[in-house]
Image (spheres, rainbow, N blue to C red):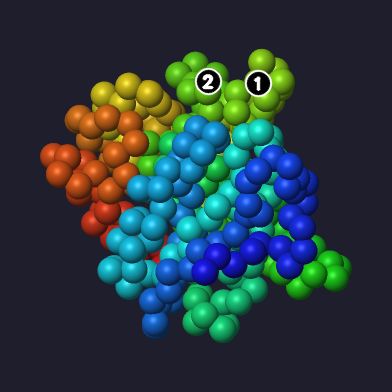
Amino acid sequence: MEIPLWAQDAPGFDPAIGQSAPGLTPCLVEGARGAVIVLPGGGYAMRADHEGLPVAEMLNRAGISAFVLSYRVAPYRDPVPLLDVRRALRLVRHHRAQLGIERVGVLGFSAGGHLAGCAALLEDGWAGDPQSDDPVERESARPDAAVLCYPVVTGLEHAHRGSFENLLGGRADDPNELRRLSLELRAGPHAPPCFLWHTADDGSVPVENSLMLAAALRRNGTPFSLHIYPHGRHGLGLAQGVAQAEAWPDECVRFLRGAGL
């Protein structure tokens, strides 16, 4: 059963758009000390099913709890998706004692990887509001770890234009907006550990996206793990049966364990 992010209407929610209110589908493991919020990709136009529950189930098999987030997509625009993932992080943290969870990470694919990266790197939205009447809003929205799978990273050279057009609408040609949401320009010294993977011949989101972000994380001293596999189309999900790339889930679990999840 999906858990709504807000007890009442989500900020900016418009039922006329035809999307359900944002929520979390829990996939819990008894005794797990870590949880990961899964963000399917889809160019900020949809959410790919194969990058949702199957990934949560993979994490469950490794003893990690997971939540699949149905964040809002176009025609909703920035900052709505980021509001959703930050609220999800706060909500899981608010219930951490009940769930037995100590640490919370994010994992996203493609545009969902961009959203996970925004949650991990745009630190101006991390802090909770200690004066809020809503106890959930008092929690931090900084993830303890971030996994970015063939992520959309940059709005500049090597951009996946469709993702930014869906995310920004009429602002997609504004260079200031594109720079603000280009993750390679937002990697700061307080970012959580990051795991990135990509295929070298990705024909939709060029591998340079992950390479640029890894270089930025290195410059800022952020712990990261980067895996570039030689072949595989964009949107592989768990990459089952794809030579070499199918190793990413095991590598990811090792990374999450090292990050305390």
Q: Residues within 10 Å of mark 1 (few under 14, many from 20)?
A: some
Give me the residue at 20% from left, 30% from top.
231
Eyeballing the image, is 202 above or below 219? Answer: above
Residue 161 disc label: 2
Q: Does residue 175 appear to the left or right of 150 in the view shown?
A: right
Q: Residues within 10 Å of mark 2 (few under 14, many from 20)?
A: some
- Residue 241 is situated, as x and y percent measured from the top left of the image, at 15, 44
Eyeballing the image, is 100 above or below 103? Answer: below
In-front residue for pair 190/183: 183
Residue 214 disc label: none
**Disc 2 to disc 1, C-alpha distance:** 8 Å
- Residue 58 is situated, as x and y percent measured from the top left of the image, at 30, 61
**Circles 2 and 1: CB distance less than 8 Å?**
yes
Residue 173 location, quadrant: top right
Q: Quadrant of the C terminus?
A: bottom left
Give me the residue at 48% from left, 43% from top.
47
Question: Is residue 94 visible to the viewer in this orientation of the structure?
Answer: yes
Instruction: Residue type at mark 1: give it.
Output: Ala
- Residue 131 is situated, as x and y percent measured from the top left of the image, at 86, 68
Give me the residue at 57% from left, 77% from top.
96
Eyeballing the image, is 244 above or below 141? Answer: above
In-front residue for pair 143/112: 112
- Residue 80 is situated, as x and y percent measured from the top left of the image, at 69, 43
Q: Does residue 39 appear to the left or right of 137 in the view shown?
A: left
Q: Does residue 67 appear to the left or right of 239 in the view shown?
A: right
Give me the residue at 31% from left, 26% from top.
202
Question: Is residue 175 visible to the viewer in this orientation of the structure?
Answer: no
> In the structure shown, which secondary structural element does the residue marked by tag 2 occupy?
helix
**Which residue carries the number 1 mark?**
172
> In the structure shown, which secondary structural element does the residue marked by tag 1 occupy?
loop
Instruction: Residue type at mark 2: give it.
Output: Arg
